Image: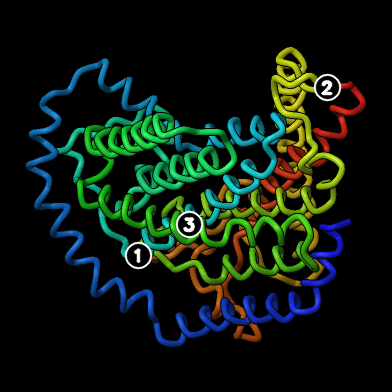
Amino acid sequence: MDMETAAAAGGAGLTAWQAAALSGVAGWVWAASYFDLTRRTRALVQPWVTRRVHAETPSILRFQRMQHKLLDNFFSVLSCVVSVPFYTGFLPLLFWSGHGKLARQMTLLMAFSDYLGNVVKDVVSAPRPCSPPVRRVTATQDEKEHAMEYGLPSSHALMTVCLMGYMLHYVLTYGACDGFMIVIGLSLALLQVILIGIARVYLGMHSLTDVIAGICLGIVILAFWLVVDDHVDAFVVSGQNVTFFWASLSLLLCFAYPVPEFPTPSFEFHTAFTGVAFGIVYGVQQTYLRFHGPDAPLILSEQLPLLAYVGRVLVGITTILIVKSCSKALSKWLLPVMCSTLGIPIVSSCYVPTLKAPSSSSGKSDPKQAGYLQKVFLLFPRKAYDVDTGIRFVQYAGLAWSVVDLVPVIFTYLNL
C-alpha cells in the first residue's frame, strides 16, 4: 500500500519529467547532427590520443617481453569477467537468487556504462596499439570482436570499475560490515581493477592511456549512478508510463549514437545491452510485487535452499536460451514483414540473407550506424535501415524479459 501511495503521489509530475527527458535527448540528437558535433570533437581529440597510443607502443613491447602461456591464459580468463557471455550468465543468477534490486541496478548500470563508453569510443575513433609490432592475444570470439572496436576508453576497465564499485556499495549499504570487511572489500575491488588494466595492456588490446581513460570515465559514471540509483529503481518498479518511456528512450538512443570513422561492433553491443535493459524494465514492471519485491526468498534461506537454487539455474538457463532463439527467429520473420508493409527500406548485414546490402558501397559508414537523423528528416530517404538492429534488440529484450517474468512463473509451477 505504501508503494502504491508513493507512486500515486509522484505520478502527477512524472509525466512532465518523462516528456522533458525525452525532449532533451531528441534536442541533443538534433543539435549534434546540425552542428556536426561528432566530427568537430573527433578533430580535436583524435590526433592527441593517436599520438599517445603510438608513443606508448615501445613501452607495451617492453612489457610484453614477460609473455608466458600461463599469463596469456590468466589474463584472457580475467578479461572474460566483463564480457557479454559473463553478463548473460551472471545477471540472471542474481535475479533468481532473490537479490532483485542488486540485479536490476547492475543490469541498468551495465547498459548505461556500455552505451557511454561506446559513444566515446566511436566519437574519438582512436586506434588500438598497432599489431604488429604489438602482440595481440584474442583467445575468445568475444575478444576478437572487441579487437575490431576503437581503443579509447578501455571498456573492460570502465565496466570493471562500475561492476566492482556498485557491488561494493551494495554490500556496504545493505550488509552487516565492520571496518575489517570494508578494507577487504575495497582491496579486492581495487585489485580487480588493477589486474584488468594490466591484462588489457599485456594482451595488446589497449594502451595505458586507454586504460586510464576507462578507469576515469568509470569512476564518473559510478559516482553519478550512486546518486540516482534509488530514484531509477523506484521509477522502474512503481513509476508511471515506464514501458512507453523506456521504449522511446531506447529508440532515441539509437538515433543519438554517433557515426564512427569506420564501422565497428560497438553499436551492436549497445543495441544488445539496450535490449536487455528494456526487457528487464518491462518484465519487472509486470511482475515486481509477485516475484521481485522485498519478500522474495533469498538463496540459502529456508524458502530457497541450495538444491532448489541449482534447480532454478538449470531450468532458467535452458529457458532463456530457448526464448532468445525463438525471439531471434520470430523477429527475423516479423520485422522485415512489418517494414515492407510500412514501406520502410531495409537491408540486413547478416541475419536475413535475402536482404543483404549490395557490396558496391565502400563508404566509411555503415547503414545501421550512419545517417539516422538525416533519414528521419528526409521525406524520401534513399538509403535503407539495417533490420539487424531491430532483430538484435528484440532478441536480447526477449531474453531479459524471460529472466524476470517467464522463468519465475515456471519456478512457481515447479515449486523451485
What is the crowding at mark 1: few (fewer than 14 residues within 10 Å), some, or many (at least 20)?
some
Q: Residue furthest front?
A: 178
Amino acid type at image mark 3: Ser
**Residue 6 visible in this rendered orientation of the protein:** yes
Which numbered disc flags the more N-terminal residue, 1 or 2? 1
Please provide percent x and percent y for residue 163: 47, 42
Q: Which residue in the protein does label 3 denote?
A: 359
Q: Which mark is residue 345?
A: none
Please provide percent x and percent y for residue 265: 46, 50
Amino acid type at image mark 2: Leu
- Determine whether label 1 and label 2 are within 8 Å by CB: no
Dot in front, 1 or 2: 2
CA gap between label 2 and label 3 equals: 52 Å
What is the crowding at mark 3: few (fewer than 14 residues within 10 Å), some, or many (at least 20)?
few
Q: Quadrant of residue 131?
A: top left
Q: Which residue in the protein does label 1 denote?
A: 261
Please provide percent x and percent y for residue 268: 53, 52
What is the crowding at mark 2: few (fewer than 14 residues within 10 Å), some, or many (at least 20)?
some
Q: Which residue in the protein does label 2 denote?
A: 416
